[in-house]
Amino acid sequence: MPPAAGAAGDVGYDDPWYDALASGWGEAPGHVPAGTVPAARQESEEKAAADIYLQVQRSQAFQEVRSSYRRFVVPAVAGFLAWYLAYMIAATTAPGLMAHPVAGAVNVAMLAGLGQFLSTFLLTWAYARHARLRRDRAALELRWDTQELTRGVRGGAV
Amino acid sequence: MTGNHQSLALMLFSVFVAVTLGITTWVSRNRRGSAEEFYAGGRLFSPMENGFAIAGDYMSAASFLGISGLIALYGYDGLLYSVGFLVAWLVVLFLVAELVRNCGRFTLADVVAARMRERPVRIAAGTSSVTVSVLYLVAQMVGAGSLVALLLGRTGEAAQAWTVVGVGALMIVYVSLGGMRATTWIQIVKAVLLLGGTIALTVLVLIRFHGDFDRLLTTAADRSGHGPAFLAPGLAYGGDWTARLDFLSLGLALVLGTAGLPHILSRFYTVPTARAARRSVVWSIGLIGGFYLMTIVLGFGAAAIVGPDTVRASNAAGNTAVPLLALDLGGGADSTGGTVLFAVVAAVAFATILAVVAGITLASSASVAHDLYASLRRRRGTPRSEVGVARIAAVGIGVAAIALGLLARDLNVAFLVGLAFAVAASANLPVLLYSLFWRGFTTRGAVWAVYGGLIPALVLVALSPVVSGSPGSLFPGVDFQYFPLQNPGLVSIPLGFLAGWLGTVTSAEEPDAAGHAETEVRSLTGAGAV
């Protein structure tokens, strides 16, 4: 057993809800998580780390990343789901409308179906562009800052 | 189908098996045996590699043969399927891929358990993931069995059974020896082969019609005997209102289910960052979208060149439309070109099934070892290495899938795939979205969301016409059919979301604000991601 689970044993081996599952039990030696701190210290450190996440969550920089993500994703999800559902409902309930010819053999249904492909490609492109230009840099900075803070709390043992 | 086709197809397929086994031995030559290595391939794949692997994981034989077959028989209604399969990727890209990559380590349960009491949540999410994977796996095994009967002549039930056993044995070897690294390379090779084959056939169809898509459609419509109705929705799903609702139910399951498929989620852990996960989804949307666009050409091409009657005579479900089209495009049944193209299509279809089953087996062995075994094992028992458990789980799941595949070989493949998507959308998606986005979500809500989607989905299927009460059902002799739809999604997906909400508002537990802050910060920034 890796030391992390051993330290967990000190906390209470019989508590059914306590677990060190996420710490990668039984991994090969040489891959040992640095968790050999005494249990009491570990607990207070986890509390401090939780405070850091709350603090980052309240920070201006994080709020901006989050609202930038939401401003794109919420309308986009609502839009494509509505467009997809409208397409499916039209296909099942209004085949007459869908069969209306447009040009040659191409009818409304064919255009709508190809439109679904097109809108999917366009939204994918728009999302990737938005994330690259508006979010990636700020998120990366926040990532290093947050990791810096938690590393400070955990005494360099992250 | 003459002996020539068979031996050439078998030869090409043997080459594929030899190459993939070579890959498996090569990548596992100096493995360290860590969980990181086994489940996530060391997390060092590039976005392009992972994009091809995702596409290889997702484009099953059901889409290659099934959708183009449906288009060949029913025209436009087959196209509705491919739209659902593609649009689903927007849900994955916008809401799931990056956030899951940032928060989790190997499985869906990692993301949810991070801010909940770990044990009950892991058991719930692990159970539903394994259920989805087994359903999907059985669908692929049944597909493999019937494919061999179709492509290599009607060699009877024994050949079908041996194919299922052989596919199962190969996939156990790939997964338990090679882990994620071998599985990924097999999927990449398969994606390249499948796309290459599809592009070649599409170009040949378009050349046949001198690049005139309009004439292709008109010819297909004339040949079908339905006229313009062939190019509009309604031939397959336009019957009574039950059939229409059933189709809406399937459409909902398709678009929401992809984001809950465990083998798709586990692919995001094979790249180093969330940005790489996003770029791999962009790659895969391009590849998958292009592929489905080409299946439209192939489907209408099969209707125009081979004709729906010939297709139906060969296989009632239309699964042989593309192989027959290949035979014709190559120059007919007795020509060298026809033989070669037919054999290529057959070998690609086999390769497709092998790559897909390997991906699913790996994901479900991760759920068993990382979630279920880790939560349920006896505390004082001898600890085993997690990877060792996962290898054993892969063997166990493989054996179970072989057995179920043999039992279920008369079930419709498309139905089984639709069912797997419905269960994924009902049991996995609500809990995933709630725990990523809802501040007040609690442990009880998480557990209820999983079981509140999983149990209704399975019960509704048991009460549906698929299982009893109609001539085509699993037990035609008895009648306990109380639910009219074949696909439970329309009811069970809202129930999953409702149960998660209900469990949360009725739970006495205070929502863990710090846990939510950690999940939110980590999911959007990647802080502390492994």
Image: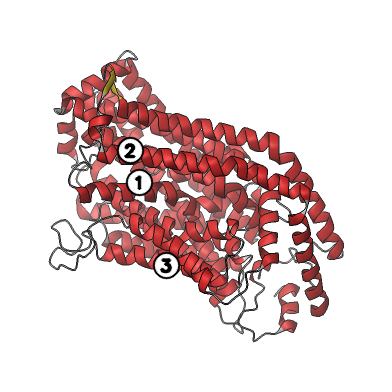
Q: Estimate the x, y position of residue B314 in percent, counting from the top left.
A: 18, 38
Q: Label 3, on which residue?
A: B452
Q: Residue at x 57, y 60 (%)?
A: B435
Say whether residue A18 is left or right of residue A100. right
Mark 3 lies on a secondary structure that is helix
Q: Residue at x 56, y 50 (%)?
A: B96
Q: Residues within 10 Å of mark 1 (few under 14, many from 20)?
A: many
Mark 1 lies on a secondary structure that is helix
Q: Label 2, on which residue?
A: B80
Q: How far apart are the alpha carbons under marks 1 and 3?
A: 21 Å
Which numbered disc, 1 or 3, marks the residue that appears first in the sequence? 1
Q: Residues within 10 Å of mark 3 (few under 14, many from 20)?
A: many
Q: Quadrant of residue B442?
A: bottom right
Which numbered disc, 3 or 2, marks the residue that appears first in the sequence? 2
Q: Label 1, on which residue?
A: B251
Question: Mark 3 is on which residue type?
Answer: Gly
Which numbered disc, 1 or 2, marks the residue that appears first in the sequence? 2
